[in-house]
Image: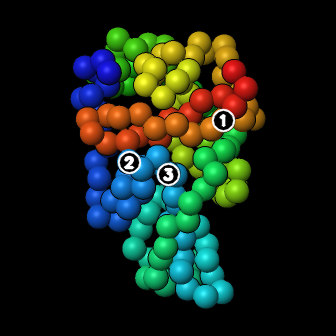
Amino acid sequence: MPQSETLLSPVVDEDGAPFWEYASRGELRIQACARPGCGELRFPPRPCCPHCQSFDSEWRRMSGRGRIWSYVVPHPPLLPAYAKLVPYNAILVELAEAPRIRLAGNLVSAPDAPLNSVPPERLRIGAKVQVVFADLDGVAVPRWVLERP
């Protein structure tokens, strides 16, 4: 992986640690309220359910399928570590089984491909995508590939 990408590994906090642990196993899981009668999914992870204020939670496995809800191709690069990757994309993915949950990431041609591996003209709102995981400084980071390239 290019040096410029390894400079920007995610910060893992206590609430989000299970997300990254599951990602290291190749699983996309989303935190959910474990209180009977609630069960609401929430992202980003947090200690308390914003719907019922319960502190009980569990991590539900998602299919990893979704669609591009929005995207941007930043010009000029917002962070210096990304300068050599221009043009790259940043996308918001709406999960298939949880439409209110949207994850930020990048559309790539393969799990370990560089962030600029998909030409900007291939980006389409509504395009179906599937999660893949790339190693970034020992952390498995979710990225997205087109379901039908």
State if disc 3 and disc 2 touch (CB < 8 Å).
no
Q: Residue 147, how many percent across, how many down?
A: 69, 31
In the figure, residue 101 lies in which quadrant? bottom right
Q: CA distance from mark 3 to mark 1?
A: 15 Å
Q: Is residue 94 above or below residue 76?
A: below
Q: Amino acid at mark 3?
A: Glu
The residue pinned by badge 2 equals 24
Q: Residue at x 64, y 51 (%)?
A: 63
Residue 51, by quadrant, is bottom right
Above or below — where is 88 with respect to 96?
above
Of residues 90 and 140, the one nearer the viewer is 140
Q: Secondary structure at mark 2?
A: helix
Label 1 near label 3: C-beta < 8 Å? no
Question: Circle 3: is it few (<14), some (14-19), or many (20+) Cα within 10 Å?
Answer: many
Taking the image as shown, residue 113 lies to the left or right of residue 130, namely left
> Looking at the image, is mark 3 or mark 1 earlier in the sequence?
3
Q: Determine crowd level at label 1: few under 14, some 14-19, many 20+ residues with C-alpha closer than 10 A.
A: many
Q: Which mark is residue 27?
A: 3
The number of callouts visible is 3
Left or right, 94 with respect to 32, comes to right
Horizontal relation, residue 108 to residue 13: left or right: right
